[in-house]
Amino acid sequence: MRVHRWACIQLKRTIMADLKVKIGALEFKNPVTTASGTFGFGEEYVDFMDLSRIGGIFTKGTTILHREGNAYPRMAETASGMLNAVGLQNKGVDYFISSIYPQIKEYDTNIMVNVSGSTIEDYVATAEKIDALDKIPAIELNISCPNVKQGGMTFGVSCAGAAEVVKAVRKAYSKTLIVKLSPNVTDIASIAKAVEDEGADSVSLINTLLGMAIDAETRKPLLSTVTGGLSGPCVKPVALRMVWQVAKAVKIPVIGLGGIMNATDAIEFFLAGATAIQIGTANFIDPAVSVKVVDGINEYLDRHGYSSIYDIIGALDM
Amino acid sequence: MLPGQFVQVRIDDTPSVFLRRPISVNYVDRVNNELWLLVQKVGDGTRKMAEYKIGDIVNMLLPLGNSFSMPKEGQSRLLLVGGGVGIAPLLFMGSKLKQEGFEPMFLLGARSEPGLMQLDEFKKLGKVYITTEDGSAGEKGFVTQHSILQEQIDMIYTCGPTPMMQAVARFAQYKSIDCEVSLENKMACGIGACLCCVTQTQTGHKCVCTDGPVFNSKELSWQI
């Protein structure tokens, strides 16, 4: 009986497409990861899903020092999405290293630390500390947080600013360097190009779109910071367009995100040119969604007779 | 499932309701295998919930959050103060207290008489005191003006509109009474990942969904 069951599993495996992708030197068992700020450090989700089923986790944004974040209210629901203004609340990189890293380092998935900052010195110092951690194979440099004064978006909205910070971090950080780009720019492809030229291994996009919500009855803004970052399915068309533009402009792999709710959304990002994807806001609606997206991608590849995820990356039929 | 915990209800088929809706557990009937939610129609999400029919399947995450704590030794005069739909978790807490041999007292407030809910259920569990703002039932005024507050009270549990809970917490602080409040900040995930529902405490921002929803009023940095 046991032998028979094993044989069936083997048989099923052989018809599954190859989902492995590479970002820089780093291999992912599949291209589905979770977006920074929507997945904590993974531990919030272990009751709902098997973390080893997904390709990786991008951690909550980590800064050199503890940050309290912005005042409540920090969130407003919108049509098919939400605005947030959390403001990089985190306990700082030293706390991460002493108290969180030991808890998560044995997870059977890639853990990428999202590194945020206000100055180049902060980014470099944080990246250097993360570089020393064996089980963290990559960082995601957040030069696109819209919710903090000098929260990185100052760097991310100009080619010169983006190049300057990536150049400095590249010197200090030896492993895979992913740079998260802001959509709040006129020409995202030129910023991606500037980041690539300074040695980034990959770019991830998009971070949230700067938005705003008002309560007409009280005449008050719905966020304590007035403006915040928009995410969810409402931003997906913008994200897809930007991934498509960036993928054409750079040679490094692109990680796509923005409103992905299911496997079909994810496949659209691969067709637009993404090598991997991140699931963000959807984790709030269904904490097990990322595993369902992995299964759905597999099913799609099988149904269309593809043997590898690379068969659909950038395969938009023009 | 413990008194004070909540569920996150997913409401499908409407783009205006994107996030799950956090709803307090009103009561758990283990004999009939029932979970009660008391829902006030305030927006599109709760209006959809009001349309649920027997036999509908509801997608929920549960149980979420911490719970009210049981009285400490020597605390026997227990007052549960609720306002509006905020009475919901107090029914469940009251039943738990009664089950543990306590005699809980309930102080329930509303704008006017029709706003008072589940009175028969509360009366099964203990003495019920009432205030309405217009005087249509019970004593006229706010819960904090009720005469029961002149008597000895060892512990207060409260849930309701924020200004009411702040007033109750202020009274508790003035009288040095232990007081637990159940907050209902706007939430996205409900599991401590998004950090949207935070409240300011003596030790920094804490998530209402996982560190709460129940806090000792002394922990909170309310402007009182």
Image (spheres, rainbow, N blue to C red):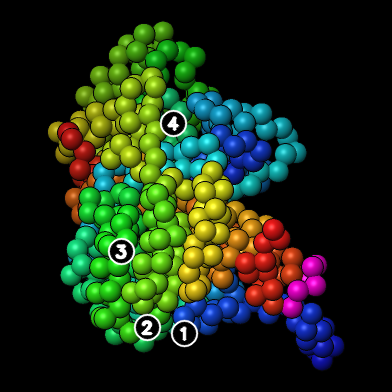
Left or right relative to A90: residue B95: right
Local packing at callout 3 (Cα closer than 10 Å; few below 14, some 14-19, many 20+) is many
Chain letter of disc 4?
B
Q: Are marks 3 and 4 on the same chain?
A: no
Q: Is residue A310 above or below residue A5?
A: above
* Residue on which the image places disc 4: B87
Kindly state the secondary structure of the residue where label 4 is placed.
Answer: helix
Which badge, 2 or 1, is on the more N-terminal residue? 1
Numbered disc in front, either 4 or 2: 2
Q: Is residue A27 above or below residue B91?
A: below
Numbered disc in front, either 1 or 3: 3
Chain letter of disc 2?
A
Front residue (pair B65, B59): B59
* Residue on which the image places disc 1: A25
Which badge, 1 or 3, is on the more N-terminal residue? 1
**Residue that appears at 59% across and 53% down:** A261
Which amino acid is tagged 2? Lys
Mark 2 touching mark 1, by CB under 8 A?
Answer: yes
Kindly state the secondary structure of the residue where label 3 is placed.
Answer: helix
